[in-house]
Image: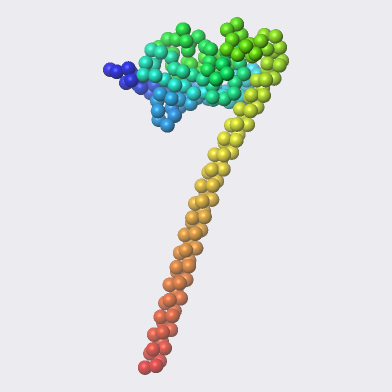
């Protein structure tokens, strides 16, 4: 069996697991049925400065998965000691401590745990690490700002979706109205023609 088939089979298994177990705080799904690219969502852990936040990620797999880890990065703004500016994540299990036993659920659960328990001694973001160690209040203030932005972005996304749905309904209603109006006009025209024909026949009979 080729590496590609092995990877696909494993990814299908991962997808079935994440859909059936519905683990709290995480979700993920392939993009446009491409099993090699997934979008993921992590809820900020309760009782942390990340609480209520909705953080999006992109996961990219190769044909060598699960022998090698996927590439995982945040696609939203993130302020965290172990997250680089481009959103990539400094996490042992995604690097030297990777094991083929890890799956999508394990990866996302570990990343969510990292939000609650950062490692400032191995920083990807020096500013975040410094504030985490020396000025926790300012660190948490910066994080809360990102949380508020993530909530607003989610609300805007939902509003747009609702707006699109309403637009579709309005279009359907308009189409029905136009169709009904056209049908009414056609019936009126037919009735007028019928009346004219009847009057013409009556006049012809009278002349005879």
How far across and how far down the image is residue 162, in percent?
56, 41
Q: Give 91 or 151, whichever is nearer the viewer.
A: 91
* Residue drawn at 33 percent across, 20 percent down: 4
Answer above or below: position of 149 versus 109: below
Image quarter in which the C terminus is found? bottom left
How far across and how far down the image is residue 100, in percent?
40, 12
* Residue drawn at 45 percent across, 10 percent down: 98
Residue furthest left in the image: 1
Answer above or below: position of 35 versus 176: above
Q: Is residue 148 left or right of residue 207?
A: right
| Residue 73 visible in the current orientation | yes
* Residue drawn at 40 percent across, 28 percent down: 34
Q: Is residue 162 left or right of residue 194?
A: right
Residue furthest bottom in the image: 208
* Residue drawn at 69 percent across, 20 percent down: 141
Q: What count of labels does the image hold?
A: 0
Answer above or below: position of 171 versus 207: above
Answer above or below: position of 135 versus 206: above
């Amino acid at each position: 069996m080729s590496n590609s088939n092995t990877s696909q089979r494993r990814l299908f298994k991962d997808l079935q697991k994440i859909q059936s177990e519905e683990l709290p705080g995480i979700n993920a799904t392939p993009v446009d049925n491409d099993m090699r690219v997934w979008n993921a969502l992590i809820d900020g852990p309760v009782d942390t400065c990340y609480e209520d936040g909705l953080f999006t990620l992109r996961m990219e797999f190769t044909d060598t998965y699960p022998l090698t880890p996927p590439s995982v990065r945040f696609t939203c703004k993130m302020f965290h000691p172990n997250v680089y500016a481009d959103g990539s994540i400094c996490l042992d299990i995604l690097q030297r401590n990777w094991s083929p036993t890890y799956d999508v659920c394990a990866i996302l659960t570990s990343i969510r745990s990292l939000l609650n328990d950062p490692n400032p001694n191995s920083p990807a973001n020096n500013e975040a690490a410094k504030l985490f160690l020396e000025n926790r209040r300012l660190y948490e203030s910066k994080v809360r700002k990102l949380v508020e932005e993530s909530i607003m972005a989610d609300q805007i996304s939902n509003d747009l979706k609702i707006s699109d749905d309403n637009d579709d309904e309005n279009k359907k209603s308009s189409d029905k109205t136009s169709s009904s109006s056209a049908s009414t006009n056609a019936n009126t025209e037919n009735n007028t023609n019928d009346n004219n024909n009847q009057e013409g026949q009556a006049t012809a009979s009278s002349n005879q």
